Structures are given as C-alpha cells and as structure tokens.
Amino acid sequence: MIDFKLPSLGSDMDKGKLLEWKVKPGDHVKRGDVVAVVDTSKAAVDVEIWNEGTVHELIVQPGETIPVGTVLATLRAPGETPEAAGQAKPAVPAAAPQDFALAGARRRVSPAARKHAAELGIEAESLIGTGPDGAVTLDDVERAAAAAKVAPAASGAQAERQAEMRRAIAAAMSRSKREIPHYYLSEIVPLHNATFWLQKENEQLPLTARLLMAVLFLKSVALACAAFPEMNGFYRNDRFEPAEKVHLGIAISLRRGGLIAPAIHDAQRKTLNQLMQELADLVKRARAGSLRSSEMSDPTITVTNLGDQGVESVFGVIYPPQVALVGFGRIAEKPCVIQQKLQIIPAVTACLSADHRVSDGHRGALFLAEIRRLLQEPENL
Amino acid sequence: MSPAPAMTDREIRTGVLATLQQIAPELEESELRPDRPLREQVDLDSMDWLNFLVGLHERLRIEIPESDYAKLTTLDAIVEYLAAQRR
C-alpha cells in the first residue's frame, strides 16, 4: 500500500484546501498524472502523483484544509490486490485513529457533517465541535452556514485571499532574511550582439513564435548554473544539496497583486523556442491560477526580470530553501568601451543574490561573468 | 488566411480595446488617454505586450513585423497603423 501525501508546494505554503479529486477508487494512475486540485494561498494547483498504482481509498474529502504531508489517499502498488491492501491496512475502526495521527491537527468530524460542509464550501476542521470529544456534527455545520449568510460574501473572500497571499509571501521572505546571509553582486551585460541576433531571428518568425530577450536571459542563467553548481540547489538541514537539473523558478507578478515563482523544468537542455513556449504557457497559467504541483515545489534557482517596470537593477530576496536568485533590470542604451572604443549599446544590469553559507563572492562574480559571456554568443544558447 | 473583411476605425478601436482587456482585465477604458503612450498607462510587461500583438494578429488578421513595434505607441497610433495595414 502506498500513501499519497500532500506534497510541499513551496516554502510559503504549509497547508492547502482540497478542491476536487480527479480520480476515484479503482482508477489506474501513473507517474505525473494529475489526481487532485488543491487551493493554496496563491493559486489552485493541479497535484501530480509520483507513483504508479491503483487508487484504493480517498481519505481527504473536497473542502477539507490539510497540512503538507497529510495522507490524501492510498494506492495499491502494481500487482497488489484489494484484499491484500485490506490486510495491510485494516478497515475503519483501526484506520481512523491512524489517519488522525497522520493528519496532525486534523479534528474529529462526523461523516455527515463533513459531507454537508463540503457541499456548502465550509471548512469542517475550522468549526467548533459540540459532539462527543469535541467532534464537529451536522448541527455545527448548519449553525456555521447560517452565520456565514450574515457575513459579507464575495468581495470579502477576494480581500481575504489577497491578505493570505501577502501573509505567505511575508512568511517566506522573512524566513529568507532571517536565515540566509545574502551577498549581492551586479554586472553590466552588453546586449548588442544579443539584440542584433534576436532581431534577425524574429524577422524570420511569425508573430506567434517570436522570442523575447527574457528567454535568452533564462537560458544563459540555466547554462551558467551547470558550470556553477553551488548556485543551483537547496540548503536544508545545515548543508547544501546541489540539484542535478536546473529548474528555473520564474518570478511572475499577478495582476491583482502578489507574485508566484513556478518552475520551467530542466531549462539548460531546452532550446530557446521551447523555453519561449513554456514561458508563455507558464505566465498564462500562473495568472489564470492553474499550475502544477511539480512546478511549485522544485525550482532550484529563481530568475526575476523587472526591466519592463523600468528599474535599472533588482537585488532580489532568495526564495528558501534555494541559494541564489538572478535579477535583470531594464535594457537601456549605455556607454560601453568595446575594443578600446567608446560606444553606445543596449545593455542590462544582471544582479546576483546568493547564499554566503554556500558560495563566496569570488565564485558569484565568476557566475555573473559566465552569464555575461554566454549572452555575447546568443547563437550558441 | 482568408482576406480580412472591411472594418471601420471605430470597429478596429473596439477590437484593440477588447484585446487589451483580455490581457489587462483591470483596465478602465474611460481612464485611458488615447493620445498618451499605452505602456505608461497600462501595466504591460514584454510578455503581455507580445500577447497583445498576437491577440491583435488573431482578431484583425494582420501581420505585425517586429520592425514596426516602435510605431505602436498610443491607442490612436495603434488604430491608425492597423487601419493602414488593412487597406
């Protein structure tokens, strides 16, 4: 029997509300399948499963808010029979306290109350129970529903969502500044070659396939990470864990405020055209509130691009447990000395925020120099 | 692509605004000055801008070469450019 738990969806999310199941008991699932939709403070996230098997039991019901790590469902491994699964995990009387322990703060809720609360969109766990041992009963749910009718509705919900997102960002960024000794470096990166190359490329491409300079930035950071593994990975349990692949977290501002930084996976192996398509898709889905759990949980480094907002440079706050963030500012005409001649060329300021527990300024400087070097040869990206 | 049907400047303007509102749903048309640079009035990053142009391309069936981006500054300029392209 395999426990399917609510995965971590980033360091600023420690709980989620199950919105819907995409599977039912008896369904066969394989690695990467979307099995549930969970609402977080930032977006509704499609939760993927990383095991193959057959859904045995759905333990958490839609409408419930559960902490990360809670067992959402159980799966039978390939070849495991329902009977064997039943033996591995005895039915209701013994299973109930086990679930209770796994879920940590989960409260006793009667099945009827849970069902009715889910229908009404009420979090049964959050109610004060008046039943035996403080269990939440059907009466408790109905009282809460009557009280909710008096409370202000829709606009209040939107404001609360905004406030919750702000709290999540506050928690992650406070943790970052409390725990991570940041150091900051910046470098002016000439973009005359990249601008010229991009113009030539885009001349041949239909509007729908044109590339943005941001994609060249992403690829250069991803390639530089491969050469500087100490910028790419996680700092956990007092040590650095380098990541094998480069999953670039893309800082995306949401139109109603706040931001989210989902990942483009394995970015160093993708072509510029692939990265462009994936970036466009990611921005669209992030703003529509439709992201996948793997995109939320595993970025290994973050890139932020605030140049469109007109700032010259951005010294970002690292998203824990990552260890580095690269920021790009506005692309502007700047005086640069090229082959001993003063020239006015397009250039951008690239900044590195990095974790001093993992790397030193010397390596950080070389990392930024590598990004600059890569952007001088756009045809090789 | 089949030839684009004739459209008045007013229809083009309506199409431009509808496309813009798909990208920036918070946009209030009454607050938009048609003679002022669009990107100073609406929060559009480079991805939004590209999506806006793709939206115009799909809605109005017009090719917009990158070398013409600089002409697309204000709402008035965009409508004028698109009208000229469709003639």
Image (spheres, coloured by chain):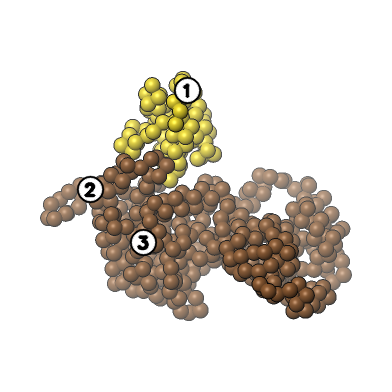
Chain colours: A brown, B yellow
Dot 3 amino acid type: Val
As drawn, is A293 to the left or to the right of A332?
Answer: right
State yes or no: discs 3 and 1 in contact (Cβ < 8 Å). Answer: no
A218 is higher (above) or lower (below) than A155 = below
Dot 1 amino acid type: Pro
* Dot 1 and dot 2 within a common chain: no
The answer to whether residue B80 is seen in the rendering is no
Q: Residues within 10 Å of mark 3 (few under 14, many from 20)?
A: many
Residue B47 appears in which quarter of the rendering? top left
A277 is higher (above) or lower (below) than A167 = above
What is the distance, in whole Å, between disc 1 and disc 2 at their CAs? 43 Å
Q: Secondary structure at mark 3?
A: helix
* Camera-nearest label, 3 or 2: 3
* Dot 3 and dot 2 within a common chain: yes
Depth check, front residue: A357 or A370: A370
Residue A153 point in image, percent of width and height: 71, 46
Disc 2: which residue: A345
The answer to whether residue A121 is seen in the rendering is yes
Residue A325 point in image, percent of width and height: 41, 63
Q: Secondary structure at mark 1?
A: loop
Name the residue located 35 percent from the left edge and 42 percent from the top edge: A205
Name the residue located 37 percent from the left edge and 26 percent from the top edge: B85
Depth check, front residue: A336 or B81: B81
Name the residue located 39 percent from the left edge and 62 percent from the top edge: A269
Disc 1: which residue: B5
Disc 3: which residue: A221
